[in-house]
Image (cartoon, helix red, strand yellow):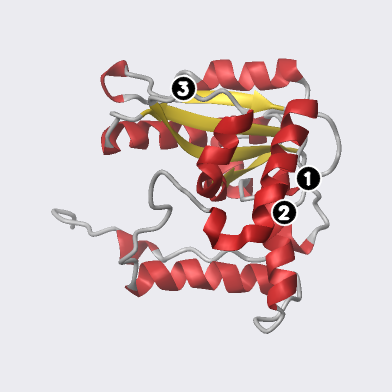
């Protein structure tokens, strides 16, 4: 029996430990062909993806491994991953999920070396066998970036239908120039994010901790209702 949309939404989460089970290209093709029906203002369809596996993916991992020890000196994102002025509830949610994640891994705030080692797993796609890199023309604005988000969410839910999982990885954006050395991304395009794709390790604590969400009354206001 196929997963319902509600089941796909409720079971989707950012997976940060994958098994080594291969992902079939035919399955990914089916998912991506369906995802082409994602909403798009004016039907512009501004999304572009490059899907890596095997040696090309390992070559990218190796290139970034050369940069990681340099710390922030090697970071050259093409956009702000988070607004510099992020504060209030937004910053609290961001900080909170990070602390919950490290709590699930039993890594304290004082164990900065262990936290750094874990963060490095981002750049091995958390062990996933597939990594999609997403880019779009530089002249695209916020409405088109919104379209890309809807496309990615559509892919994520269709992956769940197939028994697969993913992790959206904006962390890759800090290494945009280095990625371009290894992967052919048009110069007139901006690199947006990575997306790790594979089968979840269902027993890994990092895949099972509670990810808190804001209550509805914090984000929705009703007007004109009895």
Q: Residue at x 58, y 39 (%)?
A: 178
Position in image of residue 138 (x %, y %): 34, 30
Position in image of residue 99 (x %, y %): 60, 74
Position in image of residue 92 (x %, y %): 43, 73
Report the residue that reaches farthest toward the left: 224
* Residue 163 visible in the displayed image: no
Please report whichever mark, 2 or 1, sits nearer to the chain's N-terminal start.
Answer: 2
**In front of the other: label 3 or label 2?**
3
Q: In which quarter of the view is residue 221 placed? A: bottom left
The local crowd at label 3, few if under 14, some if 14 to 19, many if 20 or more residues have their Cα within 10 Å, is few
Q: Residue at x 35, y 35 (%)?
A: 145
The local crowd at label 2, few if under 14, some if 14 to 19, many if 20 or more residues have their Cα within 10 Å, is few
**In front of the other: label 1 or label 3?**
3
Q: In which quarter of the view is residue 132 placed? A: top right
Question: In the rendered view, does 154 fall on the left or right side of 62?
Answer: left
Question: In the rendered view, does 19 fall on the left or right side of 131?
Answer: right
Give me the C-alpha separation between circle 3 and circle 2: 27 Å
Provide the secondary structure element on which disc 3 rests. Answer: loop
Give me the C-alpha separation between circle 1 and circle 3: 27 Å
Report the residue that reaches farthest toward the right: 20
Task: Report which residue position mark 1 lands on.
Answer: 127
Question: In the rendered view, does 21 fall on the left or right side of 220?
Answer: right
Report the residue that reaches farthest toward the bottom: 110
Locate the C terminus by quadrant: bottom left
Task: Report which residue position mark 2 lands on.
Answer: 121
Task: Report which residue position mark 3 lands on.
Answer: 186
Q: Looking at the image, which is closer to me, 192 or 97?
A: 192
Question: In the rendered view, does 37 fall on the left or right side of 161?
Answer: left
């Amino acid at each position: 029996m196929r997963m319902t949309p509600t089941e796909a939404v409720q079971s989707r989460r950012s997976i940060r430990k994958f098994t080594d089970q291969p992902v079939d290209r035919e399955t990914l093709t089916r998912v991506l062909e369906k995802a082409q029906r994602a909403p798009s203002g004016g039907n512009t369809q501004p999304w572009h993806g490059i899907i890596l596996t095997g040696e090309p993916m390992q070559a990218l991992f190796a290139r970034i491994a050369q940069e990681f020890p340099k710390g922030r000196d090697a970071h050259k994102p093409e956009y702000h991953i988070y607004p510099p002025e992020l504060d209030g509830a937004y910053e609290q949610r961001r900080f909170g999920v990070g602390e919950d994640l490290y709590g699930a891994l039993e890594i304290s705030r004082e164990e900065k070396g262990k936290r750094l080692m874990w963060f490095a797993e981002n750049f091995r796609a958390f062990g996933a066998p597939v990594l999609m890199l997403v880019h779009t023309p530089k002249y695209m604005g916020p409405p088109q970036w919104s379209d890309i988000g809807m496309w990615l969410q559509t892919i994520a839910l269709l992956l769940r239908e197939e028994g697969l999982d993913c992790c959206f990885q904006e962390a890759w954006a800090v290494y945009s120039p280095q990625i371009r050395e290894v992967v052919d991304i048009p110069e007139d395009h901006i690199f947006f994010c990575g997306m790790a794709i594979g089968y979840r390790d269902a027993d890994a604590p990092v895949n099972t901790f509670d990810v808190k969400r804001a209550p509805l009354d914090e984000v929705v206001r009703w007007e004109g209702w009895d």
